[in-house]
Image (cartoon, helix red, strand yellow):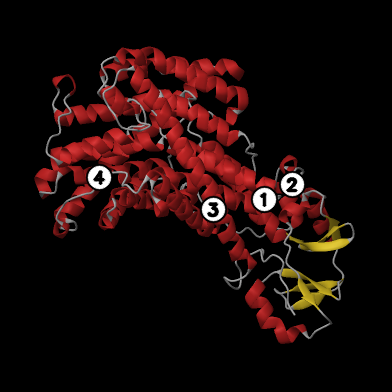
């Protein structure tokens, strides 16, 4: 009889898709989806409450419920209060961040990506600190969105649950991605797009395939929870257009032209944000004193927002209203008498400036929602000036293409962003046009990105010996990782010594090409190496509390690529070189990349 406690092989799902490994992904995905979905809904209402209070103080006539302060401000009779509220809110938000969780500063996506790739800890209180600080900042008019903080909140939830359940680093990473997808789906109402975004945003030119299953399950679960609580609504208004015209040659030329325009402004958005971050870092201020920086930097945002309230808050609710008005042919955005088209272009530039000052200074919020506003407004500008006159398609159609091409390029997530646009509008027919624009604009931007922590690609499988691996990596990192965290806990339990050749195919189908301990009559018998179809009874052993450095040194000494892991004398699994390489291959890849860059600069 073959018994598997935990199918979690060196090669992922290995020989089959059934068994405890996929079951864990489903169970963990559901668990993370429930928790992150509730957290996302709570975060949304928390930010909405702050915006509602500020809107009431501004004597706004808007009677709805939204975290986007720009809607309240546009209909407020006492807008001057924003000049005082926003800097004070930024200061309070900063004190909360730098006093309790400094890693929660700024958009939050970069620290989450870093934590994923470099095994950085996400403290248990991080989701709470991020939610409170971001709600105060965004709800008071800071130009930022809920989605970036939502990703960090979800990643923190996944990491915290994995820590509480004492899961290894591999599952911590999977649960982090699932949490990111869950909160994003709950806030944006985009289950497929959110799941794709969580696995695509981790790299500039690749996706994290191992996290797809759990991310999808988590995202769909969170979406179901959020729609049950908040109601089923589309994030953006439905489109009305002639489908016959979607793929005419002139339309395709417009998709391409809009992609180039979006790439230019995406580059401007990226450079503007990072320029402010660089200036702030040069100030050399740390600790609680750093909370003063966002409070000072949002003063220009408050002043601009007083005269042009469109740029306050996340902007997504305002964009939705603009598109509804455009759909009804009543668009009247005319700033300082400049006319509709020029006013829209001015809003794009002012929103880029406001977001860079609000978030680049360390303010707690996200870059996603402002990018939706910028991309949608830019697309609407293009539709009015060129798109609609040349195609007969309503100009607001190009706003959706603008969102996909602008944000897809700015974050190197063309596939996820295109799906999100389709789901936010409730129209999957626009998926292909969105992909055309988004993929082209992403190719123009290529390796530049808002999220500089993104590696270029998933690290390749690198074949090295334990001795070579020790020479390449930072021992300070490995000394903190214990053997048990990477232990594969599969085992074959037999009632008596069996002819393993007879059940070889079943073992391969279940486990793939890996190394598995054999337990006979409750005693350790040896290991079966399915790569070589061989049984080995003597295998070096290592205690589960030993460090990965110790494991690599033992492997190097014994000239073997796997060890039996013991706890109190009992065999609990195996540690393979493959598992260590998979975990640390990003470090090796960065090491080799730095060497390549040095060689080019020499």
Quadrant where the C terminus sits is top right
Q: Residues within 10 Å of mark 4 (few under 14, many from 20)?
A: some
Residue ID for mark 2:
481
* For discs 2 and 4, the disc positioned in front in the rendered view: 4
* For discs 2 and 3, the disc positioned in front in the rendered view: 2
- Residue at the image position 77 percent from the left and 43 percent from the top: 479
Residue ID for mark 1:
169
Residue ID for mark 4:
237
- Image height check: is 522 above or below 94? below
Q: Residues within 10 Å of mark 3 (few under 14, many from 20)?
A: some
Q: CA distance from mark 2 to mark 1?
A: 9 Å
Residue 594 seen in this snapshot: no
Left or right of 82 on screen, residue 289:
right
Q: CA distance from mark 3 to mark 4?
A: 36 Å
Q: Nearer the viewer, residue 464 or 450?
A: 450
| Disc 2 secondary structure class | loop
* For discs 1 and 3, the disc positioned in front in the rendered view: 1
- Residue at the image position 45 percent from the left and 55 percent from the top: 220
Cβ atoms at labels 3 and 4 below 8 Å apart: no
* For discs 2 and 1, the disc positioned in front in the rendered view: 1
Q: Residues within 10 Å of mark 2 (few under 14, many from 20)?
A: some
- Image height check: is 479 above or below 284? below
Q: Nearer the viewer, residue 100 or 269?
A: 100
Earlier residue among tags 2 and 1 = 1
Left or right of 406 on screen, residue 528:
right
Q: Residues within 10 Å of mark 1 (few under 14, many from 20)?
A: many
| Disc 1 secondary structure class | helix
Cβ atoms at labels 2 and 1 below 8 Å apart: yes
Residue ID for mark 3:
458
């Amino acid at each position: 009889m073959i018994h598997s406690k935990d199918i979690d092989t060196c090669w992922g799902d290995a020989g089959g898709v059934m068994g405890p490994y996929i079951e864990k992904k489903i169970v963990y995905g559901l668990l993370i989806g429930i928790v992150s979905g509730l957290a996302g809904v709570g975060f949304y209402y928390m930010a909405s409450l702050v915006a509602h209070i500020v809107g009431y103080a501004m004597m706004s006539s808007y009677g709805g419920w939204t975290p986007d302060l720009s809607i309240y401000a546009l209909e407020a009779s006492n807008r001057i209060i924003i000049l005082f509220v926003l800097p004070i809110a930024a200061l309070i938000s900063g004190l909360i961040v730098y006093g309790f969780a400094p890693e929660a500063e700024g958009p939050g996506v970069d620290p989450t990506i870093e934590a994923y790739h470099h095994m950085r800890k996400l403290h248990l209180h991080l989701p709470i600190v991020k939610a409170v600080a971001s709600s105060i900042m965004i709800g008071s008019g800071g130009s930022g969105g809920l989605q970036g903080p939502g990703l960090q909140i979800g990643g923190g939830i996944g990491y915290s649950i994995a820590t509480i359940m004492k899961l290894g680093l591999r599952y911590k990473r999977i649960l982090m991605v699932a949490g990111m997808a869950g909160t994003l789906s709950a806030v944006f109402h985009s289950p497929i797009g959110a799941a794709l975004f969580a696995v695509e945003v981790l790299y500039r030119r690749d996706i994290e395939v191992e996290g797809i299953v759990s991310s999808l399950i988590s995202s769909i679960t969170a979406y179901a929870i959020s729609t049950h609580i908040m109601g089923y609504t589309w994030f953006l208004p439905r489109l009305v257009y002639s489908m016959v015209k979607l793929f005419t040659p002139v339309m395709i030329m417009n998709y391409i032209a809009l992609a180039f325009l979006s790439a230019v402004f995406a580059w401007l958005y990226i450079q503007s944000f990072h320029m402010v971050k660089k200036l702030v870092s040069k100030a050399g201020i740390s600790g609680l004193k750093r909370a003063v920086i966002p409070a000072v930097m949002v003063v220009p945002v408050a002043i601009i927002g007083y005269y042009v309230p469109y740029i306050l808050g996340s902007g997504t609710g305002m964009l939705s209203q603009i598109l509804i008005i455009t759909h009804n042919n009543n668009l009247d955005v005319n700033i300082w008498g400049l006319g509709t088209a020029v006013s829209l272009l001015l809003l794009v530039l002012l929103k880029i400036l406001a977001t860079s000052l609000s978030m680049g200074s360390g303010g707690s919020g996200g870059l996603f929602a402002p990018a939706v506003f910028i991309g949608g407004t830019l697309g609407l500008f293009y539709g009015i000036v060129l798109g609609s006159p040349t195609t007969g398609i309503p100009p607001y159609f190009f706003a959706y293409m603008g969102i996909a091409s602008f944000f897809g390029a700015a974050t190197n997530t063309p596939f996820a962003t295109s799906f999100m646009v389709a789901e936010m509008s409730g129209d999957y027919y626009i998926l292909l046009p969105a992909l055309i624009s988004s993929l082209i604009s992403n190719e123009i931007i290529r390796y530049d990105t808002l999220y500089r922590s993104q590696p270029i690609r998933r690290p390749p499988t690198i074949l090295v010996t334990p001795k070579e691996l020790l020479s390449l990596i930072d021992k300070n990192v490995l000394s903190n990782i214990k053997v048990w965290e990477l232990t594969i806990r599969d085992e074959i339990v037999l009632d008596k010594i069996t002819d393993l050749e007879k059940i070889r195919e079943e073992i391969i189908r279940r486990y793939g090409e890996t190394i598995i301990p054999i337990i006979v009559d409750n005693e350790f018998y040896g290991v079966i190496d399915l790569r070589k179809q061989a049984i080995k009874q003597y295998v070096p052993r290592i205690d589960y509390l030993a460090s990965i450095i110790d494991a690599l040194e033992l492997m190097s000494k014994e000239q073997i690529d796997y060890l039996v892991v013991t706890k109190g004398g009992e065999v609990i699994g195996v540690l393979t070189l493959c598992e260590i390489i998979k975990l640390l291959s990003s470090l090796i890849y960065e090491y080799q990349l730095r060497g390549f860059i040095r060689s080019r600069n020499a």
